[in-house]
Amino acid sequence: MMEIIVTSIFVEDQDKALAFYTETLGFIKKHDVPSGKFRWISLVSPDDPDGTELILEPNDHPAAKEYQKKLFADGIPVTMFGVADIHKEYQRLSEKGVKFTMQPTEMGEFSIAVFDDTCGNLIQIIQK
């Protein structure tokens, strides 16, 4: 059986993304090693340090830049993070200056919100 161990998102600036994802969102840096002219930066949830890693992938390739820009322009989140209390998380992130493009909204049995990660992406959070 397979399991998802790593997923990645394209970012415009790895240092800026690392700061946002750790200092603002609260993820923990697991790896930060040189990889050519960039770095292999992976993050994990503080609640699951051995769980799925999120890679902050440089958008250096023209196709990556175009993909990222088009998704952002069309309002499409690149990934989804689960939260226990969406209203509490919305408040916490708003107080840290995070800009939301969608406030917490009920969608059947789920509640979702979407924010700008300041690195070229929209991120959706969901409370199940």
Image (cartoon, rainbow, N blue to C red):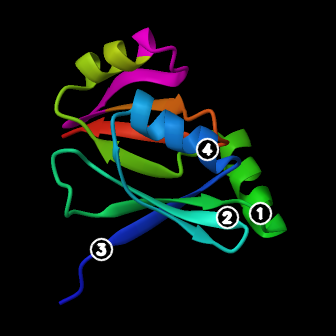
Q: Residue furthest top?
A: 95
> Marks 3 and 4, how far apart in space?
25 Å
In this rendering, is residue 20 above or below 35?
above
- Tag 1 residue: 60
Q: Residue furthest bottom?
A: 1
The residue nearer to you, when weighing 47 against 7, is 47
Q: Nearer the viewer, mark 2 or mark 1?
A: 2
Residue closer to the observer: 14 or 74: 14
Residue 112, percent from left and from top: 35, 33
Left or right of residue 29: residue 52: left
Q: Nearer the viewer, mark 1 or mark 4?
A: 4
User: In the rendering, at what x and y percent does residue 79 appear?
Assistant: 45, 52
**Label 4 packing within 10 angstroms: few (<14), some (14-19), many (20+):** some
View extreme (right): residue: 62
Task: State which region is magenta.
Answer: 94-111
Inspect the image, locate mark 3, and give the three-letter code of the amino acid beneath it: Ile
Mark 1: which secondary structure? loop
| Disc nearest the viewer among 3 and 4 | 4
In the picture, the disc for residue 38 is 2
Q: Where does label 4 land, which residue?
A: 15
Please, what secondary structure does the residue beneath circle 4 have?
A: helix
Helix, strand or loop at mark 2: strand
- Side of 4 where 123 appears, left or right: right
Q: Quadrant of residue 34?
A: bottom right
